[in-house]
Image (cartoon, grey):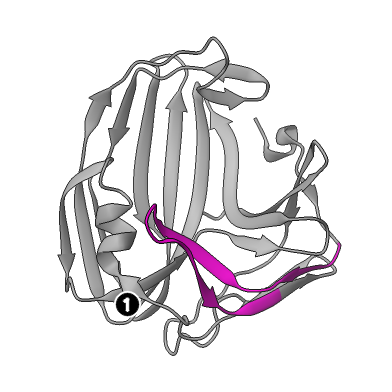
């Protein structure tokens, strides 16, 4: 299934990105980390230097992923970080901007989403994956819904990971593969940005959902962390 089957189209309009924020925990909620940007004629530009607020690296990995991985090893544990998995967009109703790809491969539905992580020093993070069975009720489609159909998954599998971050901004990709035959959901963390990923603008207008791709090139600057995103056609 190609991306266009999901209703993606190229966006050529204008929007404002007031700042970036990320979710830390149920207790802390979202925190604003600064930056500013815009989408002008369908071209994204977002600039951020050192985030205005940093948190412990444990918040981003150990706390956030604690139900999906075990035996976290974070070095140094004193590192401070921030993250961007999506940005709030204004100018056409409330919207969200995230870099992702959604499609299928064989019997798998694939979801790839990019998270940009800022670290104040070089950091290595590793974790051990799990395999866990769970029950799922689909009478009211409380489970995964894709292309108008509802699917249940009887087990979740996460793969071991070992990531190295350099001072500044670093992209990682979260890949979720939903196997329709075996009823499994497999989650993988990896470094870098998939070449097929694109910035997707989700906007809610009444009860309609518009998903629009934004063509661009992303250039994180790890040398001085002064520019986060720069884009061009």
Image vertical order of residue 111 relative to residue 127, above or below? above
Secondary structure at numbered mark 1: loop
Q: Quadrant of the N terminus?
A: top right
Q: Nearer the viewer, residue 71 or 166?
A: 71
Q: Is residue 232 visible?
A: no
Identify which residue is drawn at 34% across, 72% down. 55
Identify which residue is drawn at 25% across, 47% down. 66
- Residue 28 within the magenta-colored segment of the rendering: yes
- List x then y, in percent, for residue 108: 49, 26
Q: Which residue ends up furthest to the top in the rendered image? A: 139
Q: Quadrant of the C terminus?
A: bottom right
* Quadrant of residue 46 within the rendered picture: bottom right
> Where does label 1 land, which residue?
166
* Quadrant of residue 201 within the rendered picture: bottom right
Instruction: Please state if 198 lies on the left or on the right of 27 as rendered.
Output: right
Image vertical order of residue 91 relative to residue 211, above or below? below
Image vertical order of residue 99 relative to residue 15, above or below? above
- List x then y, in percent, for residue 134: 31, 20
Q: Nearer the viewer, residue 143 or 194?
A: 143
- List x then y, in percent, for residue 191: 37, 59
Q: Residues within 10 Å of mark 1 (few under 14, many from 20)?
A: some
Instruction: Please state if 35 lies on the left or on the right of 121 as rendered.
Output: right
Identify which residue is drawn at 68% across, 76% down. 37
Identify which residue is drawn at 39% across, 28% down. 185
Q: Main secondary structure of the magenta part?
A: strand
Instruction: Please state if 139 lies on the left or on the right of 211 as rendered.
Output: left
Q: Is residue 24 visible?
A: yes
Q: Which residues are magenta?
A: 13-37
* Quadrant of residue 103 within the rendered picture: top right
- Residue 38 within the magenta-colored segment of the rendering: no
- List x then y, in percent, for residue 225: 46, 85
Q: Which residue ends up furthest to the front in the rendered image? A: 27
């Amino acid at each position: 299934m190609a991306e266009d089957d999901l209703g993606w189209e190229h966006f050529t309009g204008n929007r404002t990105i007031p700042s970036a924020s990320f979710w830390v925990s149920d207790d802390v909620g979202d925190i604003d980390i600064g930056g500013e940007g815009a989408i002008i004629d369908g071209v994204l530009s977002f600039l951020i230097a050192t985030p205005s607020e940093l948190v412990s690296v444990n918040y981003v990995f150990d706390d956030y992923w604690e139900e999906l991985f075990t035996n976290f090893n974070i070095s140094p544990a004193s590192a401070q970080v921030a993250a961007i998995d999506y940005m709030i967009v204004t100018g056409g109703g409330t919207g969200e901007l995230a870099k992702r790809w959604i499609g299928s491969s064989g019997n798998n539905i694939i979801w790839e989403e990019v998270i940009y992580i800022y670290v104040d020093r070089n950091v290595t993070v590793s974790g051990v994956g799990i395999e866990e069975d769970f029950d799922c009720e689909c009478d009211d489609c409380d489970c995964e819904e894709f292309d108008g159909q509802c699917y249940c998954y009887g087990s979740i599998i996460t793969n071991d990971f070992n990531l190295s971050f350099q001072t500044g901004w670093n992209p990682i990709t979260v890949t979720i593969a939903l196997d329709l035959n075996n009823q499994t959901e497999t989650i993988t963390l990896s470094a870098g940005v998939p070449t097929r990923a694109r910035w997707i603008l989700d906007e809610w207008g009444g009860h309609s959902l518009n998903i629009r791709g934004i063509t661009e090139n992303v250039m994180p600057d790890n040398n001085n962390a002064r520019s986060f995103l720069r884009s061009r056609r």
